[in-house]
Image (cartoon, helix red, strand yellow):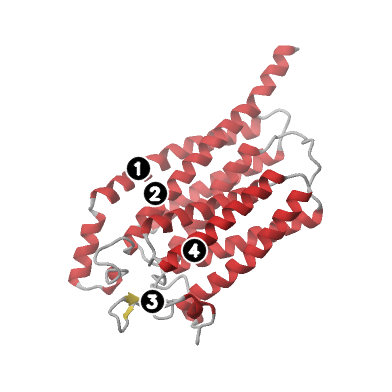
Amino acid sequence: MLKHLEFYSKPPILLRRTALICAVLVLIIIGISAFIRLSGNGLGCSPWPVCYGEILQGTPQSIHNAIQLQASPPILTARIAHRILAVVLLPIILILIILGYTLRPKSTDARWLSAIALILVIFLAFLGRWTSGRHIPIVTLGNLIAGFLLFGLCWRLFISKLNQSSIKPLSKSIRLWQILTISLLLALIVFGGLVSSSYAGLSCPNLADCFLPTSLELQSLNPLQIPTLNKSLTDIPIHPHGITANTIHLWLSLVTAVFLVILSVNLFRNKRPIASLFLLIFLSSEIMLGLLLGHNNLPLSLVITHNLLAATLLATLVGID
C-alpha cells in the first residue's frame, strides 16, 4: 500500500519540476528573441538614433548595414542559441503532456494547460518558419503573445499544488477582476509590441505629446502593413504616425496599473500576501523602466528587461489561484 501511494506521489513532483524547467527555458528564449528582434530593428545601432529602422528605407547602404548587423557575432550566437533552446523545448512540453494525462489523481488543470502549451509551441514553430525575414508587425505580436502565454502556463503548472489547497478559494468578484487585469495586460503587451515592431519608439518628442497628441492615425495600427518611415526635421527616421500606438500604450498602462493595485489589495486581504507583493514590485519596476526608456532614448538592455518584466508580470497574474 505504501509503495502504491509513493508511486502516485512522484508524478505531481515530476510534473512541477518539468514545468519549472519549461518556464525558465521559455523566459530565456523570450529574452534571446527580444534581443534578436530589437537589434534587428536598430536598437543599439550606431550612429544612434539616425540608424533606427533604416532597414526599411531600402537604400543600398541601409541594406548593407542590415546584412552586416545580422552577421555580427552577438546576433549569430543569439540565433544559434535560440534554435537550440527551441528544439529542446518541444520534448519538455511533450513530457508535460504525458505527465498531465497520466497524473493520479486526475488533474483537469494539468491536462488542459499542458495541451495549450503544446499548441502554443507548434504555433510558434510555424510562425518562425513561415515569417522568417518579414517586417510586418503581426509577426512580432504573434511571437510576443504566444511566448508570454507559454511562459505563464508553464509557471502556473509549476506553482499549482494539483490538489485541494488549504487556502480559501478566490471569490468570484476577485477572480473576475483577475481575468480583467490579465486581459488589460495582454492588450498592453500587444500595443507595446506594436510600438516596437512599427519603429514608433521615437515618435513622441516628450511624454506630454504621447498622452495628449494633436492627431491620431488609426490606420497606423494595422498589424498587417509594413510601417512607412519618413525622416523628420532632425534627420531621424521614424514612423510618422507611430504616436498613435504610443498614446494607446501609455493610457492602457495607466488603466492596467490601477487594476493591478486594486487586485493586489484584494489578494492581500484574501491571505495571499506574497502574490500581492510581487505584483506591486513588478508593477513598480515596469513603471520605472518605462520612464527610463523615454528619458534615455530606448537603450537596448532596458527594452529587453522591459519585455522580460512584462512576461513575468503576466505569469504572476496567470499563476494566482
Amino acid, disc 4: Gly
In the picture, the disc for residue 167 is none
Answer above or below: position of 285 versus 247. Answer: above
Q: List the residue tagged with mark 3.
A: 239
The reply to whether discs 2 and 4 touch (Cβ–Cβ < 8 Å) is no
Mark 2–mark 1 distance (CA, rounded to whole Å): 8 Å
User: Looking at the picture, how far across and down is residue 43, in whole percent?
Assistant: 34, 62
Q: Is 167 left, or right, of 199 in this rendering?
A: right
Mark 2–mark 3 distance (CA, rounded to whole Å): 25 Å
What element does badge 4 sit on?
helix
Q: Is 19 left, or right, of 171 in this rendering?
A: left
Q: List the residue tagged with mark 4.
A: 290
Amino acid, disc 2: Ile
Residue plotted at (41% across, 70% down): 201
Mark 2–mark 4 distance (CA, rounded to whole Å): 20 Å
Mark 1–mark 4 distance (CA, rounded to whole Å): 28 Å
| Between discs 1 and 4, the one toward the N terminus | 1
The reply to whether discs 2 and 1 touch (Cβ–Cβ < 8 Å) is yes
Amino acid, disc 3: His
What element does badge 1 sit on?
helix
| Between discs 2 and 3, the one toward the N terminus | 2
Answer above or below: position of 264 versus 86. Answer: below
Quarter assignment of residue 299: bottom left
The reply to whether discs 4 and 3 touch (Cβ–Cβ < 8 Å) is no
Q: Is residue 125 shown to the viewer in this render?
A: no
| Between discs 2 and 4, the one toward the N terminus | 2
Q: Is residue 206 shown to the viewer in this render?
A: yes
Residue plotted at (67% across, 44% down): 274
Q: List the residue tagged with mark 2.
A: 32
